[in-house]
Amino acid sequence: MDFRLSDDLQQFQAAAREFAQRELGPRVEEAERTERTPLDLFKAAGEAGFLGIRYPEELGGSGASCLAEVILREEMGAVCSGLAAALSVSSHLGTYPIHAFGTEEQKKTYLVPVLKGEKVSAFGLTEPNAGSDVRGIQTKAVARDGGWVLNGTKTFITNAPIADYVIVVAYTDPTAGIEGMALFVVETSAPGVGINRIKKMGNLSSEIAEVVLQDVFVADEACLGGDRGAFKRVMTTLNIGRVVVSGGALGVARAALDSAVEYAKDRTAFGNAIGSYQGVAFPLARSHAQIDSARLAVYRAATLFDEGHNPVQETSVAKYLAGEAAIDVTDRAMRVFGGYGYMREYPIERHYRDARYFAIVEGTQEIHLRVISRQLGLG
């Protein structure tokens, strides 16, 4: 399978890179310092056509491919992983279930404003005692006249502090096992919704929070795709999201390698540029090879989605390789910088912290190894 980009995708890549440098670049320092996501960035992304690019044009999207979204996430991630995550979550995790399973009215009410950058969305799955084990969620929705009452707690929810709504995964019938799950659009301004900010190590410009639901009433119209059978909808949403987030891992790794190569050419020791020594050059060469191989795996998975397949194993391979690349490459790059790599004045320090995100988000590395091993008939 040939993964060379078409002329159209190369043009898109150039446009995505220019957008990231123009709109994300000037906002990075302030957003990272304050640990706040600038809301005007969503508006800028919407006006530029970079929100929900895979959705139909009539909804405000571009009708682009999954591969295009991966490319966009990589270009944004190379500038700022945190801001890239905030935009990507709002334009995929918090919108894809509405696009794929919602009614026309739900799309008009919730999806279209997000694609314009007028509203921000989030996706509420993870709980204090249920992360990789989706079946273990405890949030429940009980039927009431004209709607549902939700109770439960979601945690590590990206965009929750700034979101207008959160798509919440809840059990409507716990006795039915995974078939008893449903998806609900919960507006964060609704009575009974509590948002508790969470501090974290990296991706500081991407805000996360705990979302507490206490007797939150939502109308029947807030249920996406029916009050049962949402487990498959959740997994479909996550599987595509895992490919997209892998693009972000590639972006961070690429930015770290580029900065380390430049530094290795300029920095001298013992009368020579440090990049002339194998102890520096070879780790950087390994980093290039690792990024290149991971990118091929990510592009393959995205292409399979675009061809109408559901590439479970290929997606886990892509996510695992991209996540490992982000961690390994940023570690090697930081060592090239020596003491300067430990200082806040150099971006490599931020890339190093941000890279750890990709070993956890959208399924831990161990979960993806489990998926791969099962596809091999093991375990």
Image (tube, grey):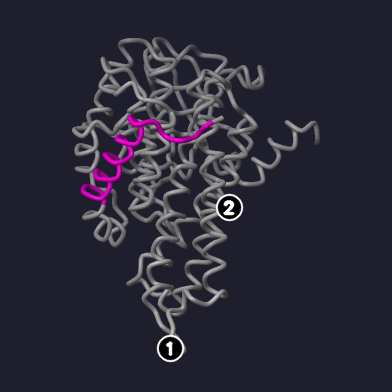
Amino acid bearing label 2: Glu
Residue 16 part of the magenta-drawn span: yes
Which numbered mark, 1 or 2, is in the foreground of this view? 1
Q: Quadrant of residue 106?
A: top left
Query: In the image, 141: left or right of 159?
Result: right
Badge 1 marks a residue whose secondary structure is: loop
**Magenta range:** 2-24
Q: Position of residue 92 (x, y in %)?
A: 40, 31
Name the residue: 56% across, 74% down: 278
| Number of residues whose C-alpha sits closer than 10 Å to that of mark 2, classed few (under 14), some (14–19) or many (20 or more) | many
Q: Position of residue 352 (x, y in %)?
A: 46, 62
The residue that disc 1 covers is 271
Name the residue: 49% across, 11% down: 226
Q: Which of the image's four quarters has the C terminus?
A: top right
Q: Which residue sits furthest right?
A: 378
Q: Quadrant of residue 166?
A: top left
Q: Quadrant of residue 344?
A: bottom left
Amino acid bearing label 1: Gly
Q: Position of residue 176 (x, y in %)?
A: 66, 17
The residue that disc 2 covers is 324
**Residue 140 against residue 369 in the figure, above or below:** above
Residue 149, disc = none
Query: In the image, 14: left or right of 340?
Result: left
Q: CA distance from mark 1 to mark 2?
A: 34 Å
Which one is in front, 170 or 114? Answer: 114
Badge 2 marks a residue whose secondary structure is: helix
Instruction: Tell me, yes or no, if residue 191 can be seen here.
Output: no
Which one is in front, 128 or 47? Answer: 47
**Residue 351 against residue 373 in the figure, above or below:** below
